[in-house]
Amino acid sequence: MTSSSDAGVDKDKTADNCGGLKFGADGYGSDSEYVTALPTDEEERQLLAGENVRAKERIEELDEGRVSNHPSTLAATNKASSASREAEDNPFKDAEGGSGLVNTRINDRESDYQKRRNNRVLREDGLSFKESMMQANLEKERDQLTRELEKDMKEGGGTTEGLGKSNNNQQSEEQGKTSTGKRRKRRWDTNSAPQTTSEKVDSAMISDTESVTSTVKSKWDEDVGGTTGSSRRRKRWDETPVVSSNVAATPVVASGMATPAATISSKWDATPVSFSGMSVSGTPAAALNQTSRNRWAETPAPLLPGTPQTPAHGVITGNLNKALSLEREMESRNRPWTDAALDAILPSEGYIVMRPPSSYVPLRTPGRKLLATPTPMAMTQQGFQMDIPVEQRQDASVQDIREAYGVPLAITSSETGEASALPYIKPEDMQYFGRLMEDTDDDKLSKEEANERRIMSLLLKIKNGTPPQRKTAMRQITDRARSFGAGPLFNQILPLLMSPTLEDQERHLLVKVIDRVLYKLDDLVRPYVHRILAVIEPLLIDEDYYARVEGREIISNLAKAAGLATMISTMRPDIDSPDEYVRNTTSRAVAVVASALGVPNLIPFLKAVCQSRKSWQARHTGIKIVQQIALLMGVAILPYLRELVEIVSHGLTDDMQKVRIITALTCAALAEAAHPYGIESFDSVIRPLWKGALEHHGKALAAFLKAIGFVIPLMEENYASHYTRLVMPILLREFHSPDEEMKRIVLKVIQQCVATAGVEPDYIRKEILPEFFKNFWIRRMALDRRNYRQVIETTEELANKVGSSDIITRVVDDLKDDSEPYRRMVMETIRKVLENLGAGDIDDRLEERLIDGILYAFQEQAVDASNTLGKESQIMLDGFGAVVVALGERCKPYLKQIAGTIKWRLNNKAASVRMQAADLVARVAVVMKACDEDQLMGHLGVVLYEYLGEEYPEVLGSILGALRAIVNVIGMTKMTPPIRDLLPRLTPILRNRHEKVQENCIDLVGRVADRGAEFVSAKEWMRICFELLEMLKAHKKAIRRAAVSTFGFIARAIGPQDVLHTLLNNLKVQDRQMRVCTTVAIAIVAETCGPFTVLPALMNEYRVPELNIQNGVLKAISFVFEYIGLMGKDYVYAVTPLLEDALMDRDPVHRQTGCAAVKHLALGVAGHGCEDALLHLLNFVWPNIFEESPHVIQAVFDAIQGLMVALGPNIILQYTLQGLYHPARKVREVYWRVFNTLYIYNADALVAGFPMVEDEGENTYARTTLELFI
């Protein structure tokens, strides 16, 4: 046999005691997949109990690999795995948990740490401080005992699954102890010393033989006695899965013993059964001397079906299965309607039940009856399963029937058209709003129940309703908050905020409800502060910035409503909570309270907490509160800086390392917030910080270094230089640290130390630069985004000290590195250095290396369509442009090479490469002009002109931008191709709807119209005018602004008449945005060509009795007077009759636009002798002050303010005095609003307008100085 197996076996010199043989890896897998030792009973028990999860997963992976590699099951396994992959491959998986294109469900994107908010234990409402502290102490003791128990069980090697069993183990361990002391447990050791049966053990674990004979029991002895109980509790995976039919068990050979041998049950013991329900031949086994089973005792189950049992179901063919499912579906669809179902679906009134005609006979065929009747045959479904329809069940409710037929649970507002109707209730919201679906009589409800239903309906409208419903419900719940009461409100709002299906928008709305309600409830919220905090505090650590801001606002308003004493007594038990999550969120909440109620009010509390001796958690949280205050308030902590530093200073020498670390981080946060002031406040911590930096290592050292790095910039120059030299050896030593966080802190500290004024450049060149570039300018640092950014910032700061030449010389050769991320890091560094310092100290040799490097890096970029507009391609483009601009005229020898690279890349098949090349032309055009390379620019212009047929809009937009840059610098006369050829080519491009194309094309056309309009015929300009009209509808404001400006340039080029005719016709369209942009264009034309060319046509157009046209004319006149300013004094009297008509019109929009025109007219001609016309217009404006529409009343007050500037405040005051004491309140309110405006803007000038008051005895009211002046 050995000779026959030589082909599959080879010698291995390094083989262990397996006979020196090693099986072929291809056929059997590697040696590492084989189990070299059987597990002990204890390990087996731990594995089955789920304690050693990693080991179990590893064993299951091994088993899965062996099964799938077996030739007989490989096809079936592959088929099953592919099916599961197809089921898991869901392209909409990320969006299915929300309401939009992305997953807006909060619970799905939370980390495990953030999900710990669901495990937080809430205290009862209204507990006193003493009761809260007692409850918190109980929780701490329980947590401490649990930790100690887990630790003891791990050290003892036992499990926590049975108290009696663990007690027995402890007793046996105590009896087996020897004088040599406790030794470490080995995997082959038994649980206890050998024990005799005379010892007290559980009778269920002893056989009859053992009860008579006194033997030494070992773990590896055979269990030959039959047992009636199990030595351990049953587990969920103890049994082999079997189908519900009776399958023959494994036959056992009879023996002379009365009781057959019993084995320890395991999940591999039972005879395997195929999933088709067929029985499998058992494995004969002798009962004599049968040892305990293990997990390798399973017999492989064959996949081929055996003899079918009755009444088991067999394999159903695809066609029959499809026919059966279709028949079941048709039967369920066509089942007769019951009265209950009709009552649930249709209204009770207006409908009658129609009886079937007497001649109607239902269609019944033998085939249908055969398939409709289930039988216990192998070709149909197993057993008799008659599915009773929902509407025919005795216990079915109306709600169940509606759900079965797909009828909405509530009548939605879209169906009834009423704002009071309930919105749609989502299935996941039924647990919160399901009671609204119950048919109840409102008159029979108690006051509390009616109140609860009212709150529930309002919250449903806020959460799921339409905007009008939401607005109304929000106002109602805010106004009636005190009548509803704090308890009923928060009992329904807070569970909604903790819902696992809550989305971002819903959370935002519910948080807004709490915010509004807090203002109304005020001190009534005090008993519920802890519950509110437990729900709102998780917002403070949310990844969304706006969610964090919302959380801070809620806690701030809660603190103002409940008061400082309530907030402190509520949050004090959480400060030393055993749960780190609770302590973290509580520290942030206390910082928000400090910022809302004032830091001085919390300083005594913080001092007490930070000096707590009972628990290090309290000290840790107190110091973290100070850190969060510094981060939250910034430079506003300066008045309290010394006290805050003294509060935390003792933490630098605390016994607990975590406290020392958080103290150092807090000092760093305080120094960062106070920069550049406050160094005198840190006197007490400088020495402990320095000492800690010398003593600590690892994370603690990183924290101390960070604190030193933020304190040094606050010092004077000589002290900063001294401490920088002291700390630098530590930093240089930590250059070699493998910890990424340490590297980032070291880089930040170097950046801060180097930025101080006392550090000399020579010291940096000799001591820092060599080690810095050796350890940080490596490829690996470019792969992590945070390291990448920090290395660039530190290098930039070093360059500011030692100059650009020293830095660029060290990194320029890395532009040719093989790693593209590293090349990008080098390019971005060079760009920042050159932008800050210029290229003055770069010599000729370095200049050549630099140009050579950027050309190589630019050409060797990876072509990736996903990075077309990404930061990666933009870095290379910005870097190339910055180098060329910094070198300026020194680039002339290299421009032809650069132009060759650009033309080569413009021919590339990748759109991103072509776009980048065109963008580069726009960057270097200014340098080409400075180098007098007009011919080269003209050549590039012709090349770009030929590419105007580009199909990709992003590339076309870049080409247009490059042409615009060339036109700007080369001028209209030297431009090639000529302008007369270029502009007609641009006209059809104006129809492109891509924003980038539109913006660049209009900008290019506008520059041509401004500086070279004479090169193009008037007909072509008119064609462009018609195309520009469509641009006025663009979504981007920059495009609309460019189109309006271009109208002015074209009007100046060809005269205003034709352009104005086109624009006035455009006032007739229905699109409001286009009409507004048209009026702005008319105003631009008036400013460019003079108002006299536009106003006559506008005033004539106002005679057309059409609402849109008249409104457009009024708006155009308003914009015209806004643009022309002082020139309007010549046209005031001409437009006054038109404005009179507008201010008397019944349409409020007419009056609103007329008031806007009066405002701009008055502001433009103030102080130029037009007061009589403006006073006349004031008489038409003043009656509109009682308008109800907010837009109209705002326009009226704007007009009055403009007339106040032009006419003086005293004239407006004479109008105002008439109504200040009117008997009607609404009249008084309007007049006092006008008077307040006058008082705010011109309080001193009103003195002259106040009426004369006669003297009363000794009181003299005469204004002699004013009277003398008059």
Image (tube, rainbow, N blue to C red):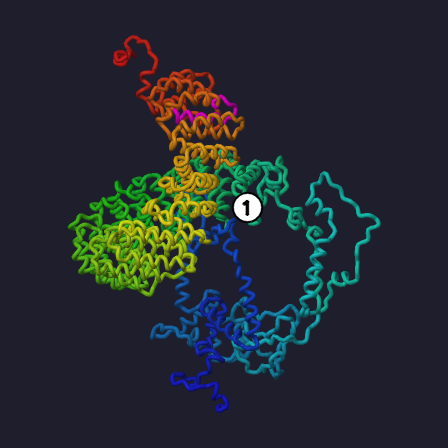
Q: Residue 1153 colored magenta? A: yes
Horizontal side of 297 relative to 352 (left or right) equals left
Looking at the image, which residue is at 53% across and 79% down? 291
* In this view, 802 is above or below 1119: below
Q: Picture quarter containing residue 903? A: bottom left
Q: Is residue 666 visible?
A: no
Q: Quadrant of the C terminus?
A: top left
Q: Position of residue 824 (x, y in %)?
A: 33, 59
Please report the bounds of the magenta region as a residue range.
1142-1161
Q: Position of residue 477 (x, y in %)?
A: 50, 36
The residue lying furthest to the right in this view is 359
How packed is label 1: few (under 14 Cα within 10 Å), some, or many (20 or more)?
Answer: some
Q: Picture quarter containing residue 78? A: bottom right
Instruction: Give the amino acid at mark 1.
Output: Tyr
In front here: 115 or 618? Answer: 115
Horizontal side of 319 relative to 239 (left or right) equals right
In front here: 1079 or 587? Answer: 1079
The residue under label 1 is 432
Looking at the image, which residue is at 30% across and 44% down? 634
Q: Position of residue 1116 (x, y in %)?
A: 44, 30
Q: Majority secondary structure of the magenta segment?
A: helix
